[in-house]
Image: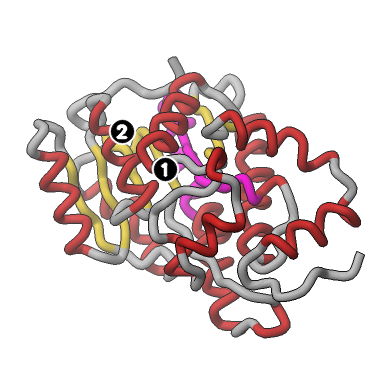
Amino acid sequence: MSLPSPAADRTAIVTGASSGIGAALARELAGRGHQVTLVARSADKLAELAAEITATGVRADILAADLGDREARAALLGRVEALGLVPSILVNCAGISTLGPVHKATPDAEIAMVELDVVAVVDLCTRFLPAMVARGTGAVLNVASTGAFQPLPGQAGYGASKAFVLSYTQSLSGELRGTGVTATVLCPGPVDTGFGERAGFTSEEAHGALPSVMWESPEVVARVGINGLAKGAMVAVPGLANRAAAALVPFLPKRLLVPILSRRHPVCAEPLAG
C-alpha cells in the first residue's frame, strides 16, 4: 500500500476542507483512521467538520488560512509542525473558477484563480515534499478535473489550470518513483457541491450541459481519490463515463471539439469559429 499508515504523530493536510470534495476527502481519510488537519478560509465551517470528525474518535485540527496569499502558504508547514504533527499526506483540493469569456474577464479575478488553482499547488508541494522524501514515506493528492483533458471555453483559465495540475502531478509521480512517496491526481467530472453556483452558473444550467451519467457525489469522488492514493495510482477518475470521456477526448480533433464544447457551456451564447 502506498498510503502512509495512521499514527499519533502523523496528520493528513486537506486544503479546501470547508465544503464539497475537500470535506468529503477529509471524512474519507478520517474514516480510515488518519488524523486530519483541515485548511480553508472559513474557520467556522472547519470547526463544524472538525467536531464531526473528532466525535468519531479521530483527531482533527483546523488551520484557517487564505491559500491565495503567499505569506499564508509559506507559514502553513510551520503551523502544522507547531501542533506536534508530521504531515504524512498532503491533499491539495482548494480551488476556484471564474466564468465567462476571457475578453469579458476581470484581470484580478483571473489572476486570483491561477494563484489558488496553480501556484498554491506548486508552492505547497515544494514545501511539504522534501521532508516526506527524507523520511521515505508520504503521499500527495492533487485535485484537478476532467476539464484537464480538454479545452474548456467559458472557463478557459480554470480548464488550463487543471491541465497544469494534471501534467504537474504526473511529472511528480515520475520524479518520486523509488522514494517511498507517491503523487496522485484526482480528476472528477461534474459534482453537486455548489462549486458551479459560486463560479456563476445555476445547478440547472450545469445539469443541462452535462449528461446525468457523468455526475458523481462528493463521497464517491473522495473514495475513488483515496483508493487511488492508497494504490499509488498516477491518475484517478471517478465514474465509468468520465473515465471513458477522459480517455477519448484528447484524441478528438480540436477544430471539431472546441465548437461543440462552446455550444454546450452555459455561458457561451454562440459557437466559436472552427
In the rendering, at what x and y percent does residue 264 appear? 69, 60
Kindly identify which residue carries mark 2: 28
Amino acid type, mark 2: Glu
- The secondary structure that most of the magenta stretch takes on is helix
In the rendering, at what x and y percent does residue 259 appear? 82, 61
- Magenta-colored span: 123-147
In the rendered structure, the answer to whether residue 258 lies left or right of residue 186 reads right
Q: Residue at x 69, y 72 (%)?
A: 268
132 part of magenta stretch: yes
Q: Residue at x 56, y 47 (%)?
A: 144
> Residue 91's mark?
1
Please tell me which of labels 2 and 1 falls first in the chain.
Answer: 2
Q: Is residue 21 visible?
A: yes
Q: Considering the image in quadrants, where does the N terminus appear?
A: top left
Task: Count neighbours of disc 1 (C-alpha within 10 A) and say few if under 14, some if 14 to 19, many if 20 or more.
Answer: many
Q: Secondary structure at mark 1?
A: strand
> Residue 260's mark?
none
**Is 264 above or below relative to 272?**
above
Tell which of 212 and 167 is nearer to you.
212
Amino acid type, mark 1: Val
